Image: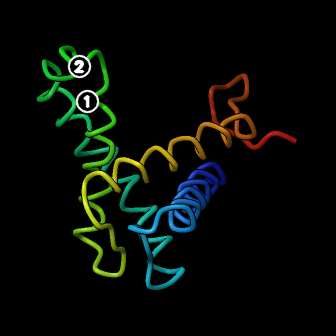
Amino acid sequence: MRSFFARLFVTALGFWIADQLLSGVWFDSVGSLLFAALLLGVANAIIRPVLFWLTLPITILTLGLFVFVLNGAMVLLVSRFLPSFHIDGLGTAVLASIVVGITGWIANGFIGKDKNGTTTTSR
């Protein structure tokens, strides 16, 4: 359970950094930032795998670069479902997804897996 909240916090941190760096991304409140992080996790778990398989030929033709567009589409989808989360367009959503991804990648160094395969926080 601690892992869930750690990943939720990391995604919210990534969204906050994107809000600070990109002029086309903003949140109305901290609560909407946390809810956007939760919705992105749900979208990435349910919708993204289906879209990934449907767009696999395009992804192969673009040598994997279409995955950036797919990730941006997930962020844009979350912003459409959450009226207090604003993104100017798909280009800004792609940049925001890159920021969130880099934040998660860096945080993954601090959140690892133990020998049982469960995710834990490193000391």
- What amino acid type is highlighted by mark number 1? Phe
Query: Residue at the spot x=33%, y=42% of the render?
Result: 71
On screen, residue 120 versus residue 96, left or right, reads right
In the picture, which quadrant includes the C terminus? top right
Marks 1 and 2 sit apart, C-alpha to C-alpha, by 6 Å
Q: Would you say the residues marked 1 and 2 are in contact, meaning their CB atoms lie under 8 Å apart?
A: yes
Residue 66 tag number: 1
Above or below — where is 58 with respect to 9?
Answer: above
Answer left or right for 91 relative to 115. left
Front residue of 3 and 93? 93
* Furthest-right residue in this view: 123
Q: Position of residue 72 (x, y in %)?
A: 31, 47
Nearer-the-camera pick, 28 or 5: 28
How did the renderer colour the structure?
A: rainbow
Residue 3: image x %, image y %? 63, 48
Q: Amino acid at mark 2?
A: Thr
Classed neighbour count for the residue bearing mark 1: other residues with Cα under 10 Å, few (<14), some (14–19), many (≥20):
some
How packed mark 2 is, by other alpha carbons closer than 10 Å (few <14, some 14-19, many 20 or more), is few
Residue 33: give x, y in percent of width and height: 48, 72
Q: How many marks?
A: 2
Examine the image and state in which quarter residue 69 appears.
Answer: top left
Residue visible at 61% across and 54% down in the picture: 10
**Which SS class for mark 1?**
helix
* Residue 2 at x, y percent in the picture: 66, 54
Task: Compare residues 81 and 16 and report the one nearer the observer.
Answer: 16
Q: With respect to residue 14, does 35 lie above or below?
A: below
Q: In this rendering, is residue 116 above or below 32?
A: above
- Residue, disc 2: 62
> Please, what secondary structure does the residue beneath circle 2 have?
loop
Residue 33 or residue 92, whichever sits in front? 92
> In the displayed structure, does residue 121 sit left or right of residue 96?
right
